[in-house]
Image (spheres, rainbow, N blue to C red):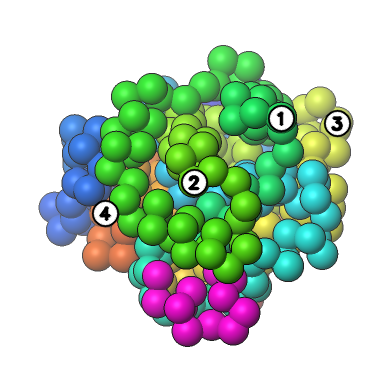
Amino acid sequence: MPCTSSEELKQIMMQARVYTQYGKVADYIPALNQADPDNLSVAISHPEGNCVSAGDVRMKLSLQSISKVLALALALMDRGEDHVFSKVGYEPTGDPFNSIIKLEISKPSKPLNPMINAGALAVTHLIKGESVQERIERLLYFVRKLAGNPSISYCEEIAASEFETAHLNRSLCYFMKQHSIINEDVENLIYLYTKQCAIEMNCLDLARIGLVFALDGFEPLTKEQLIPVSVARICKTFMVTCGMYNASGEFAVRVGIPAKSGVSGGIMGSVPNRFGIGIFGAALDDKGNSIAGVKILEMLSKKYDLSMF
């Protein structure tokens, strides 16, 4: 997809960049701690095939929690809505994304939604395949189709770093195994999940995937329905209600578009029926969202009246 630099988008990005001084990069995953907090880039992908950008949009980022949306879409296509939501709920939460509290006090003891870590682990558990390798290959094939980029893979260094430090996620898995939400070997699931989170791409890829969701699963360049309309709409609903961690309510008011962030500093936005947005800015706010990335989306939403509300 051709992508041209936009002076107008560059001005918005430069205004947002000043906020990076108030954020910090994720440090609980050692491999992410190496990121430059001042890096910032944005790409906007349109249905007609054109793309506008600002910053170093070829720089790769790992998806981290953005991958939760993609895994949810694949699990829904694999298992169907009824089965998926017998294992995970629909409700937003005000608790941090890695909290175990609601698992202990909810009846039944299933995760509240697919965008928190417990819910994402339960969803990844549902991806079909005879082995962990087959499951990650199926997910990669799906992601490559969405992005139109057959070279997308995962970063071995980041996956290994996450696997070594995933003690809290292991705890969530063991709790869910006790309550029959998952029934596979915990180490196998963590191995799969950390590779899922370590899938790498640039802002151009991210914007194109955001566009597919914006168009209810339709890929406008290949004219393929890559995701069923009903599945794409479920995913976008969770992006609105839960996509920006426990800042999702404020984000809905200030920006008002479906979006999903990750602690690498990525944000994928899907403006319904209009375009997809990919952002990378590693400096995070206290909720785990790219601090400058959120500002870019706020300015874009205000300037172009993007809110769906």
The CA distance from mark 1 to mark 2 is 16 Å
Q: Residue at x 62, y 63 (%)?
A: 180
Give coordinates of residue 293: x percent, y percent. 36, 51
Which of pointers 1 and 3 lies earlier in the amino acid sequence?
Answer: 1
Instruction: Look at the image and give the residue range highlighted in magenta.
Output: 100-111
Residue drawn at point x = 15 percent, y = 58 percent? 22
Mark drawn on residue 186:
2
Q: Which residue is mark 3?
A: 223
Q: Amino acid at mark 3?
A: Lys
- Front of the two marks 1 and 3: 1
- Measured as percent of width and height from the top left, residue 5 is found at 45, 28
Q: First in sequence: mark 4 or mark 3?
A: 3
Q: Is residue 185 visible?
A: yes
> Distance between the Cα atoms at labels 4 and 2?
29 Å
Q: Earlier in the sequence, mark 1 or mark 4?
A: 1
Question: On the rendered image, what quadrant is the N terminus found in?
Answer: top right
Nearer-N-terminus badge (1/2): 1
Figure check: 108 above or below 185: below
Helix, strand or loop under label 4: loop
- Compared with 112, 36 (above or below) is above
User: In the depicted view, which residue is nearer to us: 263 or 291?
Assistant: 263
Magenta highlight on residue 161: no
Q: Nearer the viewer, residue 162 or 214?
A: 162
Question: Depth check: 71 or 298 in front?
Answer: 71
Residue pointed to by mark 4: 284
On screen, residue 50 versus residue 280, left or right, reads: right
